[in-house]
Image (tube, grey):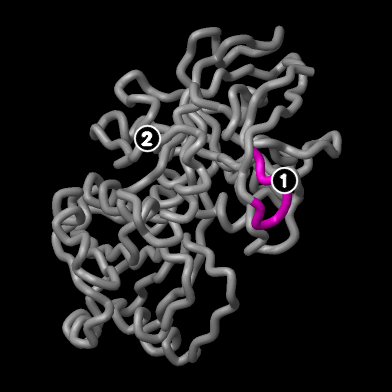
């Protein structure tokens, strides 16, 4: 076991504080990663505050990890010391079920093992990226291309793949009209990716406050959802809407913006249950769907796509001592567009 410094929530809703944790010894197929940067995702806040249900404490959040390989196990073939690598939202899965075999480890039928707030195969808690080092199986580690700086690449391991996967699955591309609902950490990545895929991109945000940013990042149009006229003007417009917001929505209103056979895909996860009238779906053969991150193969594909198109996250780099302030700023939408922790300050 190796002792490393980390920032952890000692209990639900408690401020994060500096502490130490134990990392397992590097096994035969493991890589030891010196973490350089770790993104702050809204899901870190949901889990640290038990918004999604009972959690495991102490909790070291962080599943947007970018770093350098500093040691490898004797059986490792995919990575060498010095490689630039990333770790996302999962660090293991059963590897045997239909989904795992298909490269959809995120939908492992036995449940994928989260990078934090989970129990590993030995029943030990997993600890995430707000730490100096992490040990991960090589099969759940991805390569960060040289064309991507590590700090702007870190958020791609969650925000990037979470939006890339549904855009790919629902065929965002030339001739397709895609709306991105919400212009935050996930939303700004969805705009960049959908634009790079060749789709006509519209941002739907509560206000026009971030309109200039949205257009600069690749949106063709920008509308305020607080304006009732938006829903009249855009009725029946979109092939795909990707909702990145984690607050309850009027799903009937947003489903009305879809063309027939269109899909509204949720990647944001509100803490509260939602309800809507099924006629919103029946009228137009529409789909209300969800999507969670991507498999390891698709995550690597996303990173390569981002490198080829010069896409990284828009970040605000912070020291570890600013994590608690950053959480409050995320909750008040005061970040453009992703906080990233400089792990050297941990």
In the drawing, does residue 279 fall left or right of residue 204?
A: right
Q: Up-down: is 3 above or below 209?
A: above
Q: Pointer 2: what residue? A: 317
- Chain part drawn in magenta: 8-14
Residue 71 appears at what percent x and percent y?
Answer: 62, 10
In the drawing, does residue 12 fall left or right of residue 200?
A: right
- Report which quarter residue 43 is drawn in: bottom right
In the drawing, does residue 121 fall left or right of residue 196?
A: right
The residue located at (42%, 37%) in the rendering is 340
Q: Up-down: is 321 above or below 165?
A: above
Residue 168 appears at what percent x and percent y?
Answer: 38, 51
* Most foreground residue, 244 or 35: 35
In the drawing, does residue 158 fall left or right of residue 307?
A: right
- Report which quarter residue 8 is drawn in: top right
Residue 218 highlighted magenta (yes or no): no
For the stretch drawn in magenta, what is the main secondary structure?
Answer: loop
Q: Pointer 1: what residue? A: 10
The residue located at (63%, 39%) in the rendering is 17
Q: The N terminus appears in which quarter of the rendering?
A: top right
The residue located at (37%, 22%) in the rendering is 145
* Most foreground residue, 93 or 332: 332
Residue 343 appears at what percent x and percent y?
Answer: 50, 26
The residue located at (63%, 17%) in the rendering is 32
């Amino acid at each position: 076991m190796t002792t490393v410094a980390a920032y952890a929530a000692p209990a639900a809703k408690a401020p994060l504080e500096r502490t130490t944790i134990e990392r397992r010894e590097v096994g035969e197929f493991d890589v030891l990663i010196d973490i350089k940067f770790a993104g702050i995702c809204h899901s870190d806040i949901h889990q640290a505050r038990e918004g999604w249900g009972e959690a495991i404490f102490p909790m070291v959040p962080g599943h947007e990890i970018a770093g350098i390989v500093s040691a490898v196990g004797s059986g490792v073939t995919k990575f060498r010391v010095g490689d630039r690598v990333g770790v996302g939202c999962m660090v293991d899965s059963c590897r045997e079920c239909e989904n795992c075999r298909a490269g959809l480890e995120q939908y492992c039928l036995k449940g994928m093992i989260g990078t934090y707030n989970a129990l590993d195969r030995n029943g030990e808690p997993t600890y995430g990226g707000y730490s100096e080092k992490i040990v991960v199986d090589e099969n759940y580690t991805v390569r960060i291309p040289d064309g991507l700086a590590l700090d702007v690449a870190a958020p791609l391991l969650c925000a990037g793949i979470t939006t890339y996967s549904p855009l790919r699955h629902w065929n965002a591309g030339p001739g397709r009209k895609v709306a991105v609902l919400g212009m935050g950490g996930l939303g700004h990545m969805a705009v960049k990716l959908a634009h790079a895929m060749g789709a006509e991109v519209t941002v739907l945000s509560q206000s026009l406050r971030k309109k200039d940013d949205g257009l600069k990042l690749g949106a063709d149009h920008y509308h305020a959802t607080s304006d009732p006229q938006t829903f009249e003007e855009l009725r029946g417009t979109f092939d795909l809407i990707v909702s990145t917001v984690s607050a309850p929505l009027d799903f009937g209103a947003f489903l009305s913006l879809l063309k027939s056979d269109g899909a509204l895909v949720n990647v944001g996860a509100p803490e509260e249950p939602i309800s809507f009238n099924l006629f919103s779906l029946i009228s137009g053969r529409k789909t209300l769907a969800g999507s969670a991150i991507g498999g390891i193969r698709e995550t690597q594909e996303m990173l390569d796509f981002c490198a080829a198109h010069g896409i990284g996250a828009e970040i605000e780099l912070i020291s570890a001592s600013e994590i608690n302030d950053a959480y409050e700023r995320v909750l008040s939408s005061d970040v453009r567009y992703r906080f990233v922790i400089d792990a050297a300050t941990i």
